[in-house]
Image (spheres, rainbow, N blue to C red):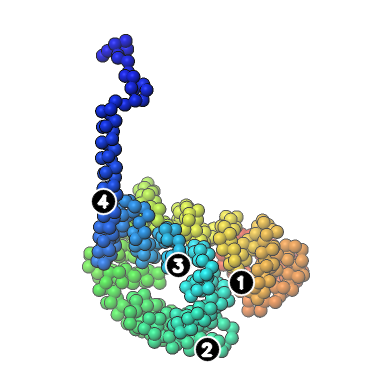
Amino acid sequence: MPTHQDQKPPSLWRIAGIRPLWVILGLLVILALIFGRGWGSKKYELEQQKHLLAQAKEFDAKGDYRSEILTLRRVLQLNPENLEAVRMLALQADRFNSPASLQWMHRLADLEPGNITNLVMWARSALRQNELIDADQVLQRFPKAQQDGLDYHRLAGALAIQIRKYQAAEYHFAKALKLNPDGSQEQLNLASIRLLSAQPQIVRDSRATLEKLTSDPILGREAAMALLADYLRQKNVPKQLEFALKIMQMPGARFTDRLLYLDLLRQSKDKRFATKLATTKEIARKEILNASELVAWLNSRGLSQEAYDWVATLPDKDRISPAMGLAYAESLTQLKKWEELLPLAAKSNWQELDFLRLAFQARAQREMNLWGSSRSSWRQAMASVGIDPHSRSLLAKLAQGWEWNSEAEEIWWVLARGETGRIPALKALHKIYHNTGDSRRLLRVTELITELLPEDPVIKNNYAMLSLLLGQNLPKAKELARVNYEQHPNDPAAISTYAFSLREEGKLSEAVVLMDKLSPEIKKIPAMAAYWGILLAEAGREKEARPFLELGRKAEDSLPEEKELLQAALNKAAK
């Protein structure tokens, strides 16, 4: 190796940054090749995108949706803003009601900001998935000129129903019918919401409209379902069975319609139930998806032994198939057949739902005291669930159903802090904290829900009452209780919460007068009786308070603070 002294000094052209002519010519040739290849590459990529899109459409036509999605993702790797690929992925996700559809539709709307069709599709998907904040935000993106259009009023009416603003729903559906007076969908929407009217004639007219629409080849099922819902509210069993049977016999009826009819037969203890169940089993045997739905339905109705016995009659390939796996595993879980569940979970492949298989494996291992293996299987389930909100929600619901509250809580909080699925996640956390009596965390979750749904009267009432019970955020709680009562002066929950707010302000006599407005029947509801008895006892009317306080003891799911108040009132009344 030459020494430092032996090395030649760098050429002058290198020091000065000057290139000899042959170097410059070489660079020009290279640049020409690069740019030439770039233009050719661009053209090639466009051709490749076109070819891949054609392939994706072929896969879609064949029902090979997995290959379609993979192909479309390859298109987006070449061009993240390929409008047709984004549109197809949005439609594909929407077809299967995947939460991912909202993300794709958001992207589609950003790529085509002036396209109202995209906004309509996005809002419909959000409503179907109960993503009410998303739906509201989409409606706000409608141009002002379109906010008095038919699609806008249809969607705004549907959103109003979801947040229990029935007057607003009626307003929007009435506007839609005015825009499209011959529209059967508009007639159906308005008639359905007017079944809730306090005016008998309006209810009768609405029912007549829906009866007429049951013969509509497209909307007949929806009309019959609206009438069935009305008869369920009325507890009219003969009409319930009549319309459930009518729905089941309609052209294009779904297998779930048959299960609905079965459910009503079972609830009414109709003697036809056993025969109809046997018929349904034979129908379900022919299609594995229907078979799994039947098993899931039997499980949910406390008939897991019936489900287990029936699955045993199916071919082995059906019993271990991905479609049947989840439902059958639930049967085994309910029957505590851990020795059968573990090999089923260990040897199966549930494809997209394999994270649930790992969860069932963890459950069987824990029940068999294989704690280390159980923890390992659960970690695998958490790792394989991915980032899809729908998949995470399924895993959280499963854990919560098993009362694995810490595991469920961890997943729900991830979703609660995400971009989609926040409200269902917070409501699930609300249930966990209410069931465990964790009032402070319950208040925190209720506050977050209130921020997301500030106009929901039930949520506002819950937040106000919890704050009063815990003595936190009192100015805000009192104002919410007052406003909620003024807006809903006949609502028992609003009345009791505002009465408690008055009590907190030292206006006990006003609180008693206000709550005394409730009917005797409402006062006898255990949860309501507890609050009425507490007010009476504190007002010195102990003798009147005692029967209500005793009734209040029967209130289910009372929080620790409510139990303390009730016990203090009972002690006072006993003196």
Front tag of 1 and 4: 4
Amino acid type, residue under disc 1 in the picture? Pro
Front tag of 3 and 1: 3
Which badge, 4 or 3, is on the more N-terminal residue? 4
Amino acid type, residue under disc 4 in the picture? Tyr
Asked if the residue at tag 2 contacts the one at tag 1, i.e. Cβ–Cβ closer than 8 Å, the answer is no
Residue 435 is marked as none
Which badge, 3 or 1, is on the more N-terminal residue? 3
Residue holding disc 3: 116
Which badge, 4 or 2, is on the more N-terminal residue? 4
Label 4 and label 3: CA atoms lie apart by 33 Å
Instruction: Report x, y in % for residue 486.
Output: 68, 71
Residue 526 is marked as 1
Label 4 and label 2: CA atoms lie apart by 66 Å
Front tag of 1 and 2: 2
Residue holding disc 4: 44
Residue 42 visible in the snapshot: yes
Asked if the residue at tag 2 contacts the one at tag 4, i.e. Cβ–Cβ closer than 8 Å, the answer is no
Q: Is residue 407 above or below residue 218?
A: above
Residue 204 is marked as 2
Give whichever of 188, 304 is nearer the camera.
188
Label 1 and label 2: CA atoms lie apart by 35 Å
Which badge, 1 or 4, is on the more N-terminal residue? 4
Image quarter in which the C terminus is found: bottom right
Label 1 and label 4: CA atoms lie apart by 73 Å
Q: Residue at 25%, 60% (x, y): give it.
A: 55
Give whichever of 446, 332 is nearer the camera.
446
Instruction: Report x, y in % for residue 467.
Output: 65, 59
Q: Judging from the image, what secondary structure is the residue with disc 4 in?
A: helix
Image quarter in which the N terminus is found: top left
